[in-house]
Image (cartoon, rainbow, N blue to C red):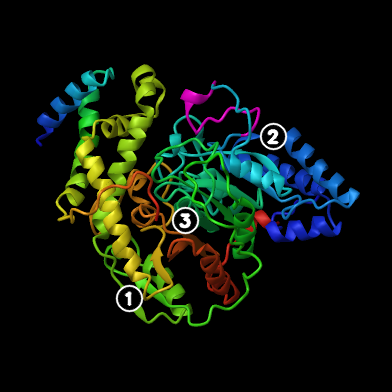
Amino acid sequence: MTPANLETYAAQTAKLLEINLPRGGAALVAAQLDVLFTHARMFAEFDLPPEYEPLPEFRP
Amino acid sequence: MTELPDHGVTQIAAAVRSGRLTAGEIAIAALARIERLDNRYNCFTRIDVEGALKAARKTDRAIRRGDDPGPLPGVTFGAKDLFDVAGQTTTAGARLRAHAAPAEEDAAAVSSLRRAGGTLLGSQNMDEFAYGFTTENEHTGPTCNPHDVSRIAGGSSGGSAAAVAAGLCAAAIGSDTNGSVRVPAAFCGVFGLKPTFGRISRRGAFPFVHSLDHVGGFARSAADLAALYDALQGRDARDQGQADRDLEPALPGINAPDRKLRVAELSGFFHGSASAEVPDALGAVADAFGKTATVTLPEVERARSAAFVLSAAEGGSLHLDDLKKHPQHYDHAVRDRLIAGAMMPSGLVMRAQRFRRWFRDAVAEVFCDYDVLLAPATPFAAQPIGQKTICMARGELSVRANAGLYTQPISFIGLPVVTVPLTAPGRLPLGVQLIGAPWTEARLLRAARRLEKDGVVKARIPTELTA
């Protein structure tokens, strides 16, 4: 997503979640979203075998 | 009363049990030291003088009566300010919680240590809501590193690690979601334990990320850490997240040799640190074990990323109501990260949890061949307070987000870790992670003790503080 798209996503999702972002807040949140989506791409691109479903209660 | 900064957990327990010192004398000495020094370090957010003296008197009465005072009589400890202490407000380092209702009862970990005869001195500074690695708290101020007060103590359990490093208390309890025990232990030059996920009850500890939170602790020797760990163990029927494990005491066998301990150094992702001192520290520990192997964990960078996303998403979800009502009460950096986390699509969060299972199974195979894996605790030593970024092989990175670069992938799958300190006069401490298969805390503590006996690792109270 482009920075502008991320900022729009941040602003619209904040409305949906009923979070009042201050002036300029959407850009700050968008910067954080950029970091998170970059990390998310790292594992989302991994070819995960289908048997690995999340456990309801994690155990190591 | 003479201060007793170098008295550790086992030393205090032995002295009080034998009658050489009373718990009251120990508590008064510790409180005097805190009074004298903590304005330099800002380790404590609340000091409970009355409560500490009352607890110490109770221990002394038990000893006079000939009753068993517990395994840690008179041992002074502090608790990160996210553990409930009966009658006190648990702030979790947040202005938002400054006026929250006082806790009705102690957190399980606090209760365990009190039952063991320990003396709680107070609550300790932390990153707001445990979301950070620096303990530069916008509301309570930064905790300063006892080895160089211009530098961070690490976080998020920074007050606890620094208090142990400065000899203000013999031990402390903290929490570790992504590295919040291991990072400050490394920066402050003390021993730190993050047990296996589910080992220690989390009841009464203010949560950050339910699926990643661990309770752990700090001490100035491997034996002291083992004694602390043993007192924290035990099944808590009121913590549904705790695993059903029997007690596995570590202290009784702490000096037993582990013949043919299979040790390997982690490579790849765990290299590329900001300074040459980090691989040197790792090399010193590896050499002491006679390490012969190097292992690369599969997909470890993806694991770190998945932990990063899970933390933001679960943390954001936990705080959503308060982010709606009181966003102005949050530290700005924490608020924006939590809001962004709350906006993460559920499909990605589920994917992170699925990847977590895959990574757990992949790493489990490595433990078929090795007992202990070695990795640096942090990619750099403690940075100056206020410094935002650091140059690494990967580029210029945020200190606050990347101090836990090497700890995050490990806690992601709940493995037990003992962080051992490498300290030397005139140099900043560094830490090395001893990582084991699930439920092997006792073995890791024995390995740490072996390194300590060989003179490779040592917690060192700064010389000027021992005078």
Q: Classify residue B156 as left or right of residue B410.
A: right
What segment is highlighted magenta in the picture? B85-99
The x, y position of residue B145, in whole percent, is 52, 49
Report in which chain the residue with disc 1 lies.
B
Q: Which residue is drawn at the image coordinates 84% and 60% (left, top)?
A: B18
Q: Are marks 1 and 2 on the same chain?
A: yes
Q: Which residue is drawn at the image coordinates 66% and 53% (left, top)?
A: B170
Label 1 belongs to which residue?
B294
The x, y position of residue A49, in whole percent, is 18, 56
Decide whether residue B87 is among the magenta residues: yes
Report in which chain the residue with disc 2 lies.
B
Of the numbered discs 1 and 2, the one sitting upstream in the chain is 2
Report in which chain the residue with disc 3 lies.
B
How many other residues sit within 10 Å of disc 2, few (<14), some (14-19) or many (≥20)? some
Q: Which of the pair B135/B39 is nearer the observer?
A: B135
Nearest to the eye among marks 3 and 2: give it.
3
Instruction: Indicate which disc residue B196 carries.
Output: 3
Q: Label 2 near label 3: C-beta < 8 Å? A: no
